[in-house]
Image (cartoon, coloured by chain):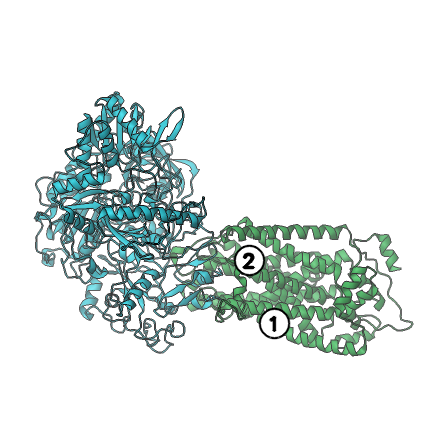
Chain colours: A green, B cyan
Amino acid sequence: MATETHEASQERSIFHPEIGSYEEVNRDSARFLTKPGPGYVALLGLALVMAGIGLFAWMWQIAFGMGLSGKQNPVGWTVYITTFVFWVGIGHAGTLISAILLLFRAGWRQSIYRFAEAMTVFAVMTAGLFPIIHLGRPWTFYWLIPYPNQRELWPNFRSPLLWDVFAVTTYLTVSSLFFYAGMIPDIAAARDSTKVPWRKKFYTILALGWRGTHHEWKHWTRAYLFLAALATPLVLSVHSVVSWDFAISIVPGWHATIFAPYFVAGAILSGVAMVVTLMVPIRKIFGIRAYFTDLHFDRLGKLLLLTSLIVGLAYGIEYFIAWYSGELMERDVFWDRLFGDYWWAGWTMVIANVLVPQLLWSKRMRTNLNAFFVISIIVNIGMWYERFVIIVPTLARSYQPWKFVNHQITPVEAGIIIGSFGFFFLLFLVFLRYLPGISTAEIKEVLPPPMRNRKLPPPREERYAYETPAGYREVAE
Amino acid sequence: MSEGLKRRDFLKVLGATGAGAAAAGCTTGDVNRLIPYAIGDEEIVPSLPTWYASTCRECPAGCGIQVETHEGRATKVEGLPGHPVSHGNLCARGQSSVQGLYHPDRIPGAFRVDSAIGRQGVAWSTAERTLAGAIREAAGRVVFLTSDYTGTMNRLADDFVEAVGGRRVVYEPFGAQPRNLEFAEADVLVAFGADFLETWGSPVDYAWQFAQMRSRRGPDRPKFVWVGAHRGMTGLNADMWVAPRPGTEHLVARAMAGNGNLAAIAEETEVPQETLVRLAEEFGAGNGVALGPGSSMSGPGARELRQAVAALNGMAQPDELDAPDVQDMVRLVQAMNAGEVDVLLIDAIDPINTLPGGLGFDEALQRVPTRVSFSSFPDDTTERCNLLLPNHHFLEQWNDYEPREGVTSLVQPTMRPVFNTKQTGDVLLSVARQLGINPLSDIEATTYHDYIRANWAEEHGADQDGWREALRAGGLLTLEEAPEDDEDEDAEPEVPNGASPVPGQDVNGAQQGPTQAAPASPGTTPADPADGIDPAAALAAVPPAEQGRTPVVSDGRADFHLVVYPSLRFYDGRTGNRPWLLELPDPVTKVSWDSWVEIHPAAAEELGVRRGDLLHIESPYGTLEAPAFIYPGVRRDVVAIQMGLGQKSFGRYNNGRGVNPNHLLSPAVDEESGEFARAGLTVRVGATGRRHRIYEAGARVQHDREVAQAISVAALHEADERQEGTVPGYEIQTLRGRGGLGPTPTPTDPAGSFPTPGGHHGEYLAGDTRWAMVIDTDRCTGCSACVTACNAENNIPVVGPDQVRKGRELAWLRIERYFGVTRDETEGMTQESTNDTRFLPMLCQHCSNAPCEPVCPVYAAYHTPDGLNAQVYNRCVGTRYCANNCPYKVRVFNWFTYEFEQPLNWQLNPDVTVREKGVMEKCTFCVQRINEVNRAASREGRPIRDGEVTPACVQTCPSEVFVFGNISDPESEVARAAATNRSYRVFEEINVQPAIVYLKRITHEEPAESEWAHY
């Protein structure tokens, strides 16, 4: 299909040398949908509990008021908007991998893109909750949606918050469509292989009558490509719009032209880190080393390193401009970020996002999953703090010296943040169990086609962690 | 305003209706009966307020007030226009009187308290019978302890006491302060601890006079010198601070009069000799007026100080004050201890908390068998009484009051009583009747109202018409001008020298006050530079060294002089239960809801104390623990504590807050001033090692922002001379094209090179109304009356101490107080920094190019055609982006739905929406008042007159800091006031085009500037 896929004509795929046959892919893909083991159930339970905590905290906040969060009068946005930007950012790597790499015909995306795209959809779903959570009167959130109404009100199109509404809903729509469209052939395969009645019905509906005819494949390929083309600009636009939530304002430290590229780079950095954070445990738990190979981690590591460098450059430019502008308040804000009351957040951001990823210059670090996993977690934390540093210290030390304050996080805020992770992982875990996580059709594109007398690679030793060894052997045989 | 009886009857019906409606609205309890509002009163138009003239009784100053009532509910109190005491203005305490009226802790009816059965509600008839019986049994061993009654009530109390054969003791904590001084024309004003802008004498009047005095322009700007060990709000307004050793203030006064050996005095007072010389020269050169002694200075030396102050004012002897002698109080306590008092009737302000702890009133009270309290509130004294006969609040009373000679004010009920209370005058009459004393003092009267009428007929010859007229006018007083003409521009900065009316002279023609000897000519010649004094520079020679010696610390503790001073907010404690005042940050420390101990940074360092460390303070008479507040405005050997809090049972808002420094004081009486000796006490201060977090709002320094700016007299004069009062190129009064104030041209950005500000947003046209405000920071004393007035007018809830600590106070208007301009917080920690204190009222700037408007996704923040930056609460979804984007940080958010506890909710202004949780709010320039005037003007088919609209803050300001009006009319007061060499706008450089123009504070010295000032 593309340059790299020429390798498919060889004996083995350069991306997945351990996968020998199409059948193996079918089998592994189906394995995800079988009965889960206790590990999965425990994870699911944990996610449920976390989401429950978040839901409770939110209900509490709705009942009594936004005062349960740690905000003050000049600090109107804190960890909710921080977490919102964090989750929106997470999504971007998914789209980058699934859409942009598709357009670039990067064969190594095939095995990981479904997870990445799922991550995108769920991250945007999670993110989309936060603008509602952070409203003082969340029950009126629909007033932001422009539609003819008996209230005779029309939203203010000059407000970046309204642009946000469009950015996020567009992103959710397009990435969901892209995610779903890509899954149709696999759902059809699942429909054909499952014996559970309700699953059969479920997949039948979702498969939209896919039969795998040449005609269908032809249209599907086209549609998929178009959707990828549609999703591609969103990687740049969505986070640019989100950045304008800040850049459009006149707040020193926010009002900067660099914000759009700076945010996009940051989004991809955090997204790639999150992909790694998800892939490492999935590879271990589901025993799919053959699919998530060292090569994948190596390339993700390079991507992470690149975006980290861009982000580091952006930090530097921000500081340079603050100094170069000679603007008193601009300088104050940036000074405060590193040396003021929020120095801990500022340095967490710099160390985690710029310094720690430098370890990835080494290939050993990129392919050492444990190390890379830890780095990815650190970058995730760092990227959350980046948004925190942009939002909270800036508002806490803005123009008016009388209103210099400090923000303290409250249990409700912590609960809602925990809940957002719970919600995200809940969706992700459910996805793993009920929808095909590996894009069978697309992986097969980068595998050597089945031919007579082909030598198969030796059977893999990996296990499906939640199944008994015996059970695995049964399947393997 | 009408004749009384008719209105009262009406109010009875109306009150019942209103109560019913309120009950229905608030869904508490069943409503069995509603009286339909079918036959309206001719005077009352629903939705339109009715105003009653009355007199404020929150302190002895007796300001004339007018009370706004809506459908039989008093909602707001304002100064009575033209009143010789209030000048149409009112202080924060006066503004809070409606909260006293509707205070949920008021005693709801008559109670008998028995150790066996506890507190038991009784009918008024029963209570009066009990009292009559007790008095009869006491056979003359009756004492009536009253506050400083004047007029009718004084006569009634005297006659009653005489008839029952008892004794009367008058107790008023600060009753001995003169309320009739005139110093508007002074060139040098020296206050010896007299906090005349806060509590001393007649603060609203004095603040007004002070503003008049300081509004004189030119190089001969009057000076104000503060003499005192502690610099309170009044002291911070001084151009110079002299801090003699406590107890030696009279020596400073003597040195100023040119008596005594300067070197010896300098040593004794620890004031540098050259300062004394300069003071004397300055004082002698112009029209000097001395005020004092202040209430914190009663004690050793106070007698000499009074004489020295009188001498400075050119009088041989101090005025005889018509003030109660606290010796009576001491004798009363002795009599009580000796068991000589059987019945004690108390109608005075909480003696347990306001008397010095050393006096032991509390213990003595226990020995009186029958203790009767007339207090409306369950204060500590009332809690110990066994018969509670709560008086009406003064807004429910008939009464009269004579704050000073020549001013006899009337107090009239503005509504039906909220609780089942009874006026003390009526109780006395009723008890007298039961005792067979009838008629009392030859006046045949069954009610106190009849009694007062009869007394007025006798004393003032007031017939029916005269009485009506007095009621309408608020009393027997010569108004300064017709009330209709009251407008805020009365006293503008440009008022010519000495044009201020002279109150207190009108009625009897007699001139009172110590300024008699001062030159009568208003155009007093300034000090001639040839005399060797350069007026602008003379006071610049304030010694930079910190005043006072740091006490020696031994064993972690040190001896300090104790200064106890009354509070701007709580006075002697009587308003210490008002939520508005509790939440109002103290003008100096910016601490609310709490007490603190002011201690100098050097002394604090010596003791190893940081802000919020609990200090243990021990005097021979008591101890207390209070958090330290590091404040450079005290001598190094002084700790200062504000009184007003620390009561034990003063209701839900006050409970457990603060400490009462009166409990530290000695019972010694200063013979001459007739006050208890508050000064002269040495206390031992040490850290406890524990902390008590106090929340100090705001910053002490401006972090180079220069939001509060100042200009020196010399620089201003030079600019004025050169440019005749206006700044060329800075045509702030001209409105550009489609709205907004013109941008300031700069060398790189000539006017017109960038888009018309406000052009895209406001959509208002040139020549249309553009509401704007001028705030003269030179006049602002920091008294915060505007803040409380704003609370009252705009239904701003009180959020409570926990929320305040989180920075969530909802006040739309705040007074920022800065000690320095740079970013160095320690800069605000030197005594010198307090010389350049700047107060800055900060409220919504109603920007033409408002940053809050474009970011609101639902148009809750939008621009009205008359230039207001409006906020639609119902449309607000609560994104808070507007607040983030507001450079002035004047938008406040409803983090919760705040409760107005019953019946405090009766005070709510029906013209203003009550907001719920999740909604942003801010100053509206009192849009409801603008609309009211707008409607009236359009009904009459005329344009709005200049000065017709007065927002609540503008209305109440005792110093008349604010000018409000339509700035697009170049003839308007606000446009003229804005076009001066002192004009500036905060954050002008970000081009938000605020509608509030500030006028710089004027300093004698060259003011400090941040290094970024001319960036």
Return the residue nearer the eye: B831 or B405: B405
Q: Outermost residue, front direction?
A: B39
- Chain letter of disc 1 in the image: A
- Chain letter of disc 2 in the image: A
Q: SS of the residue at dot 2? A: helix
Rendered image quadrant of residue B323? top left
Return the residue nearer the eye: B241 or B893: B893
Q: Is B979 on the left-hand or right-hand side of B526?
A: right
Q: SS of the residue at dot 1? A: helix
Rendered image quadrant of residue A201? bottom right
**Amino acid under label 1?**
Leu
Which residue is at 88% across, 73% downward?
A451
Crowd band around label 1 with a 10 angstrom C-alpha radius: few (<14), some (14–19), many (20+): many
- Judging by the rendered image, the residue that carries numbered circle 1 is A234
User: B17 above or below B146?
Assistant: below
Q: Which mark sits nearer the N-terminus, 1 or 2? A: 2
- Judging by the rendered image, the residue that carries numbered circle 2 is A133
Return the residue nearer the eye: B339 or B249: B339
**CB-based contact (under 8 Å), mark 1 and mark 2:** no
User: B412 above or below A112?
Assistant: above
Q: Is B258 on the left-hand or right-hand side of A31?
A: left
- Residue B81: percent from left, percent from top: 21, 55
- Residue B934: percent from left, percent from top: 31, 66
User: B818 above or below B143?
Assistant: below
- Residue A311: percent from left, percent from top: 57, 66
